[in-house]
Image (spheres, grey):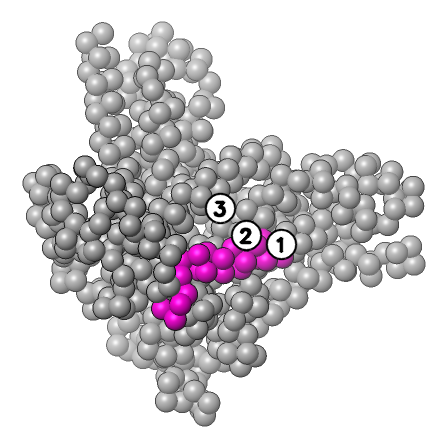
Amino acid sequence: MKTNPSLSNLFYILPIVAVILFLFLYPLAYALYISFTNMNTFHFFHYSFVGLRNYVSLFKYGYFWTLLGNTALWTVGSLLPMMALGLALSLILNQRDLKGKSVFYAILILPWAFPGFISLLVWQGLWVDPYGMMNRLVLPLLHLPPINSLTSVRGAWIELITTNVWLSFPYFMTVFYSSLQSIPNELYELADTDGAGAFTKFIRITLPSLKGTIAFVFITSFVFTWNNFYPIYLLTGGGPGISTETFTVYAYQQAFSYSNYAFSSALSIVSTIIVVVMAVFVLRFTKILESIT
Amino acid sequence: MLKRVISLLVSYLVLIVTCAFSVFPLYYVFVTSFSNAPSLISLDIPDLIPSHLHFSAYKYLFSSGFLERTSFPVWIRNSVFLAALTALLSVALAMTTGYALSRLNIPAKKTLATFIYVLTFFPYTVTAVPLYLLFAKLHLLNYAGLILAYTPGTSTFAAFLAKLSIDSIPTSYEEAAMIDGVSRFQAFLRIVMRLALPVVALTALLGFLGAYLDFALAYAFILPNVKLWTATIGLYYLAGLLNPASAPAYNIFAAGAVLMGIPLMALFLVSQRMMTKAYSSLAGVK
């Protein structure tokens, strides 16, 4: 070790470099290679180069724009209600004269704590039309029309987003709640002596104090939801047709349900490019990198 | 004063409604697991308030095999095996990387750190397809392949937590030990790993949960071999999503979901507490 310190230092970094090379970069390069071929069930061993054909058909038949629209709707459509509900609950829990906070909090955090994959299988059963409990019990109780995600695109989105909100609102509630508690009480007391109303205090004190947290949570969750695979795969399978299909889900299905490896690889490459662009944007925006490297 | 009372009443109302929303699916699956309803159709609304607890679903889960004599305990055992090895590998990888990024003089360290951070944004489904095709050629569509595929995700993320946590440990401990003749690697094993124990535990837990709850890769890699099935594939099958015709009764799925979910929920709550601690140390760095 004394003879050549830099050589022995490499021992610590080699494993991760090997992992990145063989399990991230090599597969990505391989996906890029496959995406220029016609590899599928019929041409698994004897595939040939087809140039940009997979990418051309991705754009020519409108898949790209449909998938982009769906992915954007899925991401923003989930995030806004999740964050709104999380923020509302954190504000409610943060009231000083509210009793039983810890009990409410312990119950509200349960959807986050229960393994998401299992919850999704349970929700899948709940949403089955017409036997599931949502259509038989919950929706009639609320005087709402039944939801059939097999035939109605609107119904499929309502089902997906409701379930996704259930899965994730406790995360936002927790993050907002802990950041609300770090706002000094003196600010509110000062505002009280100035005779400020609840709404003014919210706009002038609470929101500005939460700005950093909201931005950070929004951007990181944006990438997470964009890539999120299980809710759509398990609940609607991208249906009806491909109307709730996102990049991630569609790429997975094309490969493992239809053996369209080449087309799936083209999709993966496109979605990777989008994710990398977003990641770079996140790094620039949040300035996290300066603090951790 | 009246205004305050009304706003408190509204607060309680909102909390009660959202609590009902939170609890309903979990209550539903819990109650169903103690019913004797063989299918979704036969599950009636009055069944949600059970008058009698049936343990038949639980007995069935533990007593009999489903397909080719595999059963629920076998799936759980398979999952635990996979998850434990993934956890072990993730800890080794994350700690050595974190140590190198924090302490050692390595060329292009900053670039490497940035690169690893960008990788944490990658969905693992993006590499799932090429990994599947590559592993098919290398005869790795088995547990070895699955562990290789699971490890990078957790370890790249955990490497950052490890780096931050090692940053906060004074170097004097290791330096003193190394002056006493202990090698750097031994100092790393005995001193740094011990002082960074919370991150070691957190990495192990995240690696374990990640592998245990994976479905996408396991489904792609090992579906044809029923004997290798993990608990998530088993549960997917029990829910009637793999082959509706051959799936056993719905209350058996519910019992499986409860049995698998409750311990993982406990693990999650533990890791949550640890995450909060790890993040607060991260906030200290900022």
Q: As displayed, is residue B11 above or below residue A292?
A: above
Q: Nearer the viewer, residue A270 or B87?
A: B87
Could you tell which of marks 1 and 2 lies nearer the N-terminus?
1
Task: Give the chain of mark 2.
Answer: B
Q: The residue marked by circle 1 belongs to what chain?
A: B
**Is residue B121 visible to us here?**
no
| Residue highlighted by disc 3 | A285
Name the disc covering residue B207, or none.
Answer: 2
Asked whether disc 1 touches disc 2, contact meaning CB atoms under 8 Å apart, the reply is yes
Q: Residues within 10 Å of mark 3 (few under 14, many from 20)?
A: few
The part of the image, by quadrant, that contains residue B176 is: top right
Please give the name of the residue rendered at 53% of the width and 81% of the height, measured from the top-left corner. Answer: B137
Q: Quick check: is A78 in the magenta stretch?
A: no
Q: Nearer the viewer, residue B197 or A37?
A: B197
Q: Amino acid at mark 3?
A: Phe
Could you tell me which quadrant the N terminus of chain A lies in? bottom right
Q: Residue at x 37, y 30 (%)?
A: A106
Callout 1 amino acid: Leu
In the image, residue B204 above or below residue A15: above
Residue B65 image label: none
* Number of the front mark, 1 or 3: 1
Task: Give the magenta part as a residue range.
Answer: B67-90
Q: Are marks 1 and 3 on the same chain?
A: no
Checking the image for residue B88, the label placed there is 1
B102 horizontally vs A157: left or right:
right
Distance from Cα at disc 3 to Cα at disc 2: 29 Å
The residue located at (37%, 35%) in the rendering is A109
Quadrant in which residue B52 is drawn: top left
Q: Secondary structure at mark 3?
A: helix
Q: Secondary structure at mark 2?
A: helix
Magenta highlight: main SS: helix
Work out how far the residue at label 1 is from the one at label 2, CA to CA, in angstroms: 8 Å
